[in-house]
Image (cartoon, grey):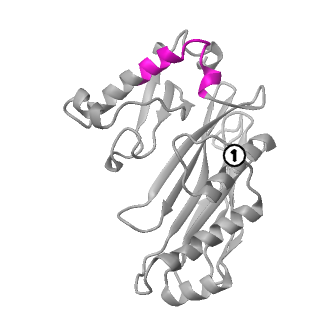
Amino acid sequence: MKAMVQSHLNRFTLTHISSGRVGRIRRIGLLASGLLMGAASLSANAGSLISSTEYLDYQLPEKIQKMCTERDNCPEIEIKYLKTNHGWINKTVNARIDNLVVNSKPTESAPIKTKSSQADVTAAINDFATSQFQDMPEEVSWSYSLMVTPDYLGHVNNFELFEINSYVFTGGAHGMPYSEYLTFDLTTKKQVTLDDMLIKGKKPRFEALAHDAYKAWVKTVADDVSSYEKSWPFMLSDNVTLTETGINIRYQHYSIGPYAYGMPVLSIPYSQLDKVIKPHFIPK
């Protein structure tokens, strides 16, 4: 049976502690029993948030475990959950992770709409693992992959920034990655959307700036912007995050370009966003 083995060096740095580092290595593996054991990878920003992740404790159905062990092609399942010292952030991020696992076919900036129970998550993974052996011939040795993990990106002002990345492979030329940003306001204890960032009535201006950023990006992959846009027209995504220098807009595969172009990120500097986004979203 294939084993997925990873090691994680846990570390954190707190305010006023220079290069403080606490490390612990744990080995993670998809064991012969099919159990994906848990581990945590700690990190922190220079403020009050401490972030870690832990693996979903999941066991393959006995029938699938036996079959894939014999064929040496067990599905690769890697689901991580967020653990921070802010429970309300954990709740939102992990609910989204559950929904991505249950649906396994995320769409462009798909909103958080429903709650998924742990039973729903387990059933979805079981169905995913089982489908591998329903879809492909016995002589095929490759395996399906389902991975969903959160990442901490840091903070801007009082806003904590995260990203959820997923990857689904069910055969074919390539798998399907997916990525979405999540922004949280520590002051209001709420998730922040693009509409929350924009000054009322300024969305058309933001869209125009994003379109300009799109044109600049197109020039890096094509000779003629107008010809390119006929095949891959511009669209505004609300999948955004704050950075030290501006707002980044993430696009999924096939949104504004072919798969080979990846998941483009358009950047709009804060110098162009004065009187477009609310002042408290601009770094001080």
Indicate the secondary structure of the residue bearing disc 1: helix
Observer able to see residue 139? yes
Q: Quadrant of residue 74?
A: bottom right
> Measured from the top left, where is residue 85 in percent x and y?
78, 44
Front residue of 102/44: it is 102
> Measured from the top left, where is residue 39 in percent x and y?
68, 63
Above or below, comparing residue 177 to residue 248 in the picture = below
Relative side of 127 to 91, left or right: left
Q: Residue furthest top?
A: 275
Magenta range is 194-210
Amino acid identity at mark 1? Val
Quarter holding the C terminus is top right
The residue sitting at 50% across, 49% down in the picture is 178
Front residue of 94/100: it is 100
The residue sitting at 67% across, 85% down in the picture is 62
Relative side of 75 to 93, left or right: left
For mark 1, what is the residue?
A: 93
Observer able to see residue 4? no
Above or below, comparing residue 271 to residue 8 in the picture = above
How many numbered marks are there? 1
Front residue of 6/123: it is 123
